Amino acid sequence: MKKYLNIYKVTLINELQYISDIILGFLSFVVMIFIFLNLWNYMYDDPSSLIEGFSKSQMIWYVIITEMIWFGTRNKTLINQITDDIKSGSIAYTLNKPYSYAIYVIVKNFGEITIKFLFYLILAIAVGLIFVGPIDFNMSNILMLIPVFLLSFIINACIRIIISMLSFYVEDAAPFHWLYDKIILVIGTVFPIELFPKFLQPILKFTPIYVVNYGPSKLVIDFSMNSFFTILMAQILYLIFVIILLSLIYRKGVKKLNVNGD
Amino acid sequence: MLMEIKKELKFMLLNVKYNLAREMTNKITFLTNIIFMILNNASFIVEWIIFYSLKNNIGGYNFKDIILLWAIASGTYAICYIFFGAIQDLPKLIMDGKIDSFLVQPKNVLISILSSKTKVSALGDLIYGYVLIFIYGINIKNIILFTLFIITGGIVIASIAVIFSSLAFYITKADTITSSITSTMLNFDTYPDGIFKGIIKILFYTILPIGFSSYIPLHIIKSFNIVNFLIVIGYTILVVLIAFYIFYRGLKRYSSGNLMSARI
Amino acid sequence: MNVIEVKNLCKTFKVKEKEKGFIGSIKSLIKPKYKKIEAVKDISFDVEKGQIIAFIGPNGAGKSTTIKMLTGILYNDSGTINVMGINPNKKRKKLAYEIGCVFGQKEQLWTHLTPYDNFKFFGSIYDLENSVIEKKIKEFKEIFELDEFINTPVRNLSLGQRIRCEIVASLIHDPKILFLDEPTIGLDPIVKENIRTLIKRMNKEYKTTIFLTSHDVGDIEKLCKRVIIVNKGEIVLDDSMENLKYHYLNKKIIELKMKEKVNLDDSKGITILKDKGYNLKLEVDTKKTSISDALKLIDANNIIDINISNVPLEDIIKSIYKGEK
C-alpha cells in the first residue's frame, strides 16, 4: 500500500509544474459553459418553466458539473501511456515487478488529476455562481457526494485502461477512445438522461454514463437519498464488472504478447 | 508570381499525396480512422434531435440548417487538416528549432511545413461533410458553393492557427494557446450563431473568425448574396496575407537564433 | 573560382538566464537577464570549386552555427557570406537550388517509401522534369550501388544504406555544393569506408564542392584536401591536409622496452612523454634531431623491443584545439 502512496505523491508533486497549462486550458471549459448558457437561455422561453422537471439553472449547473468531470479528469496517461507500453512491449517487464500494473496506472492517474480536478472544481463553482446563481444545495450532501465522485473517477479510469488495452489486439486503439469520448460527451454531458425518449432511458442507465457522469452530476443538482443509494449500488456493481473485465483482458493480452515475443 | 503560386500548389498536392501513401501503409488503421471519425461526427446528430424535439427553431435555425452548419464545419476542418495537417505541430516545431530542414528546401517554408502532414481522420470529416450536404439538398449550386466555402474556411482556420502559432517565436506555451483557440472555434461553429448575443458576435468576426468560415457561407448557400460572397473571398485573402506576414516576421527572429539556448 | 566566400563572419546569441526555482522564474519574467554567447567571432575563408573541405572542431566550437549561416538557416550579425554568388540571408530559396544538405542524424527521407519514390519526390521539389529525374536516378543507381535496395521501403534499410540514400536525395538537383554534417556518425568501419569512397567518387564525377563537418578523424584524413579547424568561434588552423601532416609528421614517437633502467632527460628535439624506467616513450622532432642521433643516446644492446611511429592525426587535432603549436 505504501508504495502506491509514494507513486501518488511523486506524480502529484511532479504535476505542480504544469499549473500554468491547467489555467490556460480553462478557456475551453469557459467557452463550453458559455455556449450552453446561451443555448439554454434560448431554449427556456419562460425562465421559470421546467423542461422534463428541470429548471433552467439546474440544467446549466448540470452541464457545468459534467464538463467539470470531463475537463478535470481527462488524462493522457490513461490513453497514451498504456498503448505505448503495449506497443513497445515494455508492459511485459512489469509482470515480474512487485506491483500491479493496472493499480500503478490508476494511482499515477489520480496523482496527475488531483490538482487539475481541484482547479476545475473551484472554476466550476465560480462560473456557476457568477453566471447562473446558487441552486438548492445542502452542504451535508458533500459527504455523500465524495464517494460517488471517487467511484466515478475509478470506473472511468478502468474503462479507459480497458480501451487502451485493446492495443493488444488492434493496431490503433485511439478510435475506440473517441467512441467512448462521444458516448460520454454527447449522451452524458449536454443534458440529463431524462430528456431522451422514454423508451431509451432504461437502456442508457446501463451505459457507463449513468455511473461516470450522469449519476454524480444529477446528485449535485437534485439530491435524494433514494437516488444516492441507487447510483452508489450501480457504481459498485459496475466497478466489480470493469475490474473483472480488466483483469481478463490484461492476462490474455500479456500472454499474447509473450507468444508474439518469441 | 502566378507561376510561383502554381508551383507551390503543385508541391503542396505532392506532399499530401505522399502523406496519404504513408498513412495507407496500414490499411486497417487507415480505414478505422476514417470510419470512426464519421461515426464520431454523426453522434452529434443525437444531441440536435433532442434539442429540436424541445423546440423547432433554435437561434433562427431549423433542423435542416443545423445539418448545413455541420456540413460546413466538418468540411472546413477536413480541408484544414488534409492540406495543412502539420498546423497543430507548428508551435512545437518552432520551439524545438525543428524547422531547419524546411529552410534548406527551395519552397515556401510555411507551405512546406503545413503540408508535411495529413490527418487521416480529416478524410472522414470530408466524407461526412459531403454526405450531409447531400442530405441537405443536392444541386450543382450547393455543391459548388459548398466546395468553395470549405476551401476558404479551411484556409481561414489554418491562417488563424498560424498567427497564434507564430507566438511560439516569442513566448513558450504558444502551443497550448493555439490549441485552445482552435478548439474554441470548433466548439462555437457547430452551434447556431443566433443563440449568441452582443460582444461574442464581434469575436466571430475578429479573432475567432468562424463568422467568415461558417456563418456567412451558410447564409450564402441558403440564399445567394454577392456582397457577402465577396466579403468571404476578400477576408480569406486578407487573413492569408496577415498569416504569412506574421509568420515571416517571427521566422526572422528564428533565423537570428535568439530563440532558445538549445539551438547553438 | 571561389564558390564560398566568407569575410569577418560574426554571430552572437542572446541566451536568457534563469535563476533556479519559482521565484527565479518570476524574476526572469519581469526582468529577463541575457547572457551573450559569441558563437562565431570573425571567421573568414574561401572555398574553391571542387574542393573537399573539412570543417572541424570540438562541440560548441561554432561549426554548426557556421554551416547554418552558410545554408541560410541562420542570419549572421556582421560580416559577409557569399555562396555561389548568393547572399544566403537574402535569397534563401534561390540558394536552395544550388546546394544540397545532409544534416547528420536528421532524416529527410520518407521512411515508408522506397528510395526510388523518395528520389522522385525530392526531384519534384526542385521542379525537375520527370525524364530528368529518371535519368539522374539511373546514374546514381550505378555510382552509389543502389541496385539491391532501390525498391525496398527506407524503414527496412540498414543505416549505411539509408545514409547513401540521404546523400543521393540531396544530390538529385545537381547542387554545386554539398554540405555534409557528420555523414558517418553511428556507422561501422566498413560502411564508413564505403561512404567515403562514394563521396570521393561523387566529387570526382560531378566536381561537387564538399563542405564536411565530422568528429571522425578517418573521414577527414581519407577525404579532405583541406582542413579548417575552429575552436571557441575562431579559426585556429586553415591549411592543406598535406601541410598539416607534414608539419606534424616530422614528429615521431619512439616506444622502447629496455633490459635495464635508463636515465634520459629532455634534450634538443627530444621530449620524454613517458618514463617508467624500463618502458620509455619519446617524441622526436626530426627537424632538430635525426632518429639515428636520438637512438645513439640509448644503448642498443639494452633494447628488447622498439617501435617508431607517426603522431596520430587525432592527437594532432587535439593539440591544435588546445592551442599548442
Image (spheres, coloured by chain):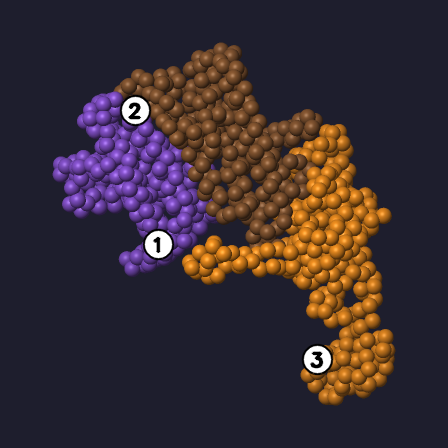
> Between disc 1 and disc 2, whose residue precedes?
1
Q: Residue at x 78, y 55 (%)?
A: C45
Disc 2 vs disc 3: which is toward the camera? 2
- Considering every residue shown, the one lying at the far top of the view is B139
Q: Position of residue A117 (x, y in %)?
A: 31, 46
The tint of chain A in the picture is: purple
**Residue that carries the numbered disc 1 in the rendered image:** A12
Q: Position of residue A262 (x, y in %)?
A: 47, 48
- Give the quarter of the figure containing the C terminus of chain B: bottom right
Q: Chain of mark 1?
A: A
**Residue that carries the numbered disc 2 in the rendered image:** A42
Judge whether residue B61 can be spotted in this image. yes
Secondary element at image label 1:
helix
How many numbered discs? 3
Q: Chain of mark 2?
A: A
**Residue that carries the numbered disc 3 in the rendered image:** C274
Looking at numbered disc 3 in the image, what kind of residue is underneath it?
Answer: Lys
Q: Eyeballing the image, is C8 above or below B129?
A: below
Q: Which chain is brown?
A: B
Marks 1 & 2 on one chain: yes
- Give the quarter of the figure containing the N terminus of chain B: top right
Q: Mark 1 touching mark 2, by CB under 8 A?
A: no
Secondary element at image label 3:
strand
The tint of chain C in the picture is: orange
- Considering every residue shown, the one lying at the far front of the view is B198
How far apart are labels 2 and 3 at the CA level?
A: 92 Å
